[in-house]
Structure formats: C-alpha cells, structure tokens
C-alpha cells in the first residue's frame, strides 16, 4: 500500500544545483524515494512535456510528487508550477530578497552555476586535472615543486580520487605518492619527499576496511591480508606522527569531506569558486 | 569608494551545498564579490568564531556581508544568525514545508548530502573512477564491454575530464578513445570500436579553440597548427555523421554540461544520485 514518493529535479541547465539542494534536504528524512532529474527544461514546450510527465506519475502512484526546480525563466516556471506536485522553487524563493539586498536586478539569464564561465577558469580546471593525472601514484616527483599538496599514504587509501576531486572542484594541484613497503620498513620520510615536507598531507584508513578494498582487487593475496594491512597502516601513521605530517582517516568519510578537511587544515589556496 | 561585497558560505560539513546554492543565485548578478567558505561549523564555539569573523568584515568594509548557511543544528544556527549580515538560511527556509509535505519530522542531523553514504555507493564511485582511469586515452579496448559509454574524439577535446566527471558524479563507466591520424585518414570507424558502436559518443570542438589548447601543450608544433586542427575536426565530425554517432561540441560548454547532455541523449543509466 505504501508507494515510493517520486522526486523531480528540474533545471534549465544541468540539474546539478537542483539535485544538490534537493539531496541536502532529503537526506534529513528517512524515506525511500524515486528520483528523476530533468535537465535542459529551457522552453515552454519542454515545460509542458515536463508537467505531463509529473502529472502522469501523480495519477499512476496516487501520491503527489515533489519537485525541486532551479528554472530561471519566468514563463517556463509559470508553466511548470501548474503541475500536480509540491513545488519547491529555489530561484523564486531567494532571488527577490537577494535583489533587494544587492540593490540591482538579477539578469534572469539561464542558470550558469555549472556553465562554462570564461576559458581561463576552464583551463585552470583542466590543467589541475592533468596535473593530478600526471602526478598520480608517485610516477615521478619531478613536478612536486608545482604541487599545492602532495598526498601520501599506503596503497588504496583513496589518494587518487581525492587528488582528482581537488582539481575538478577547486582547481588545486594535488600530486600523490604511495608509501611502499620499503618506505615503511625504513621508517623515515622517503628522501624524494624531503624537499616538499611542507606540502605533505597523509591519508590513512582502518586496516579492516583496507583489507576489504584490497581483497576486491587482489583476492587472497599477501597484499590483501589483514596482517599486511595492519602493519602498513600502523607504520604509515607512525611515520605521519613522527614527521608531524597532518593526516586524515578515509574509512568513513567521503571524498568531498577529505578534500574540504585538507583545504582547511593545510590552508590550501583554491583557484576555483 | 566601492567595496567588494563579501559572501560567506557556512556549513556544518563540506560547504558544497552552501556554495552551490549561493553560486547559482549570485551568477544572476553582475557584481564582484569576495567569497569565503567556512566548512565544519558544527558547534557553538565555532559559530561564535564565525560570527566574529563576519562582524569584523562588516566593520572593516562598512558593507553588510551576505551569508548563505546550510547549518542544520538549531543552537548553532541561533548563534550564527546574530551576525551583522544578510542571512540566507537554506535549511530553515525549506525544511518545515518539506516536513509538512512528507508528514514526518526531519532528523536534524548534520548535513550528509556530501557525506559518505554507505560503503557500497562509495565503492561504486571509486570503481567507476578506476574504470575511467584504466580505460583512458584508448590504452586498451579490452574492457569496453563493461563500459556504459565510450567517448571518441581527436586529441584535447575534453574526453578525459568528461569521463572522470561521469564517474565521480554519476557512477557511470566511461572509457575514452582518441581518434588518431590513421583513423581519420581511413575515414571509417576503427575496427576495434565496431563491437561497441552503440556505446559511442563523439566529442568535437572548434578548430580555433583546439589550436589554442594544443599550442599550450606543444607550442608551434604541427600538432598545434590551425591547419592540422581544422583537418582533424572536419574528418572526425564527418565520421560521426556518416556513422550516426551522436556528438557534442565542447568549445563553449562545461564538463558538467557535456556530461548531462550525454546522459540525456545516450540514455545513460546513473548508479549514483
């Protein structure tokens, strides 16, 4: 008898803002949802099609859908609002008070929050991403002088995803260096990292979780054994502490949370807002 | 005499939702801003520090700052609201109407929109990203059977960033294949792509912009010459049209817009919401 609520995220561009805002509200509720994103709803024709789609769900499920909209164009929004759903309009809610506060009218131009911006910013982003890819997994330390941060940790702690995320979201140049068995046995900072000591940020993880991740990759290997994972984690954390390298634990936090933490703690300078 | 307005994005977690909200509204105004993100404001002590920081800016600039807040905790918010600024409270604005609509109270738990979620979803994301990295730049077509989409295009059209973005944001498995001079001269679909014809999605770009990008990489090379770029683009687009491969032009659009367009047009199935 219980039907899943359907939630629509409607946008005149990518839908990313509508999804981000909607998700952040919906994560406050312990409720199962059917989620539908409808991007590029930027003219009256598409608005009418969208209303039909929403109304069809309302009829079929017998439950009023929820709509999160970031559509800017007034005419398109007027059509959308006629749907049989609870309508949350992010633009309408905040733009009028913001116009009053800033003392200037808004452009009412189609959403550009995830648009291109100028070529310079696009290039910064791509350059940062290429930097992350070219300086992944310790392939070379030659370019570390240009890095904003060098992430260090044992294999499979999440160094690569965090490096790439820092590039894409913030335009930060992140290299990453995997601590090898040899580095760990030696117990001292690898000499190639010495000149970049102030850029180092450690990533660690619980040994049990590391075992799970490595097990997926190389089942029943020495590499994936709990003993090996415990040894590596203990030695890596020991190294971080002795060398006063700040570090985060990736066991239960997201890529986004690690990235934000690094920015705050290591005072990284963002190139993108 | 004109002072830049300062905008604060305040969050109990990463600040990504607060920034997304604020940016999507502020891009509607042609106005210069000083932007400050304050993540992890999750207790009264930090709230007080934050208020001090905002008030100091208000005093120094003589202009009331603007605050976008996604802080969930009521006590922390009550403190924050005492700052001397125009305060946009995302949570407060939408959560009560949403509670009424859903008929259940919200958890008032700290923002989890960019939190970890369960390990399964985290693993999907990391797997998709590893897939993109391992199937970048045509290194191998061996795993194309597992790809959701295979992005094809000449060198420097943006295939890699789009592949990685599809993985991170949507959990989509994207491989990418660079069309070589040989492929372009031949004028037919490279035989290794034949079995995956239905997964192909083309990326093109204006020749002048391609020249700029390549010039940065290999100045004054044949590779970066306008003539070479024009030839490659014309032949690639000819191939896409003859083979009925859908394609997008990356000249003036963002990584996010290309990704959204592909999802809609190629009906890609997302693993992450």
Image (spheres, coloured by chain):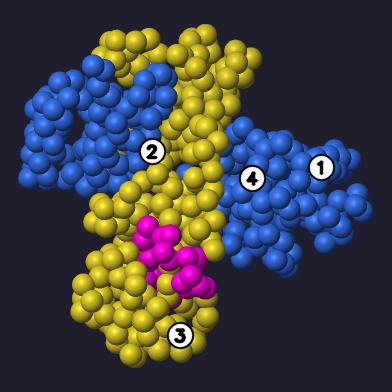
Chain colours: A yellow, B blue
The percent coordinates of residue A59 (x first, y second) are: 53, 23
The residue beneath circle 1 is B227
Using the image, tell me which numbered label, if any, was put on residue A273.
2
Q: Are marks 1 and 3 in contact (CB under 8 Å)?
A: no
Q: Are marks 4 and 2 in contact (CB under 8 Å)?
A: no
Chain letter for mark 2, please: A
Q: Is residue A192 visible?
A: yes
Per the rendered image, the range of residues in magenta is A135-159
Q: Are marks 4 and 1 in contact (CB under 8 Å)?
A: no
Q: CA distance from mark 2 to mark 1?
A: 36 Å
Chain letter for mark 3, please: A
Q: Is residue B53 above or below residue A85?
A: below
Q: Quadrant of residue A56?
A: top right
Judge left or right: residue A51 versus residue B177.
Answer: left
Judge left or right: residue B164 versus residue A232.
Answer: right
Determine the residue positioned at 49% across, 24% down.
A111
Using the image, tell me which numbered label, if any, was put on residue A144.
none
Chain letter for mark 4, please: B
Helix, strand or loop at label 3? It is loop
The residue beneath circle 3 is A223
The residue beneath circle 4 is B213
Q: CA distance from mark 4 to mark 1?
A: 14 Å
Q: Earlier in the sequence, mark 4 or mark 1?
A: 4
């Amino acid at each position: 008898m219980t039907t899943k609520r359907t939630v629509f995220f409607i946008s005149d561009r990518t839908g990313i803002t509508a999804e981000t805002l909607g998700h952040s509200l919906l994560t406050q509720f312990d409720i199962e949802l059917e989620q539908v994103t409808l991007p590029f709803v930027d003219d009256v024709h598409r608005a009418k099609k969208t209303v039909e789609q929403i109304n069809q769900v309302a009829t079929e499920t017998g439950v009023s859908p929820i709509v999160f909209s970031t559509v800017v164009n007034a005419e398109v929004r007027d059509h959308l609002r006629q749907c049989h759903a609870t309508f949350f309009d992010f633009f309408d809610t905040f733009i009028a008070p913001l116009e009053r506060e800033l003392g200037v009218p808004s452009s009412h131009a189609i959403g550009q929050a995830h648009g291109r911006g100028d070529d310079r910013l696009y290039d910064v982003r791509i350059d940062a991403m290429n930097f992350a890819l070219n300086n992944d997994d310790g392939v070379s330390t030659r370019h570390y002088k240009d890095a904003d941060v060098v992430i260090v940790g044992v294999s499979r702690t999440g160094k690569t995803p965090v490096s790439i995320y820092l590039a894409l979201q913030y335009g930060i140049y992140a290299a990453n260096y995997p601590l090898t068995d040899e580095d760990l046995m030696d117990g001292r900072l690898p000499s190639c990292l010495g000149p970049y000591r102030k850029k180092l940020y450690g990533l660690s993880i619980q040994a049990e979780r590391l075992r799970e991740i490595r097990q997926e990759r190389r089942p029943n290997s020495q590499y994936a054994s709990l003993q090996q994972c415990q040894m590596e984690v203990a030695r890596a954390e020991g190294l971080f502490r002795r060398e006063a390298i700040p570090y985060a634990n990736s066991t239960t936090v997201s890529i986004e949370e690690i990235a934000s933490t690094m920015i705050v703690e290591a005072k990284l300078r963002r190139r993108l807002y």
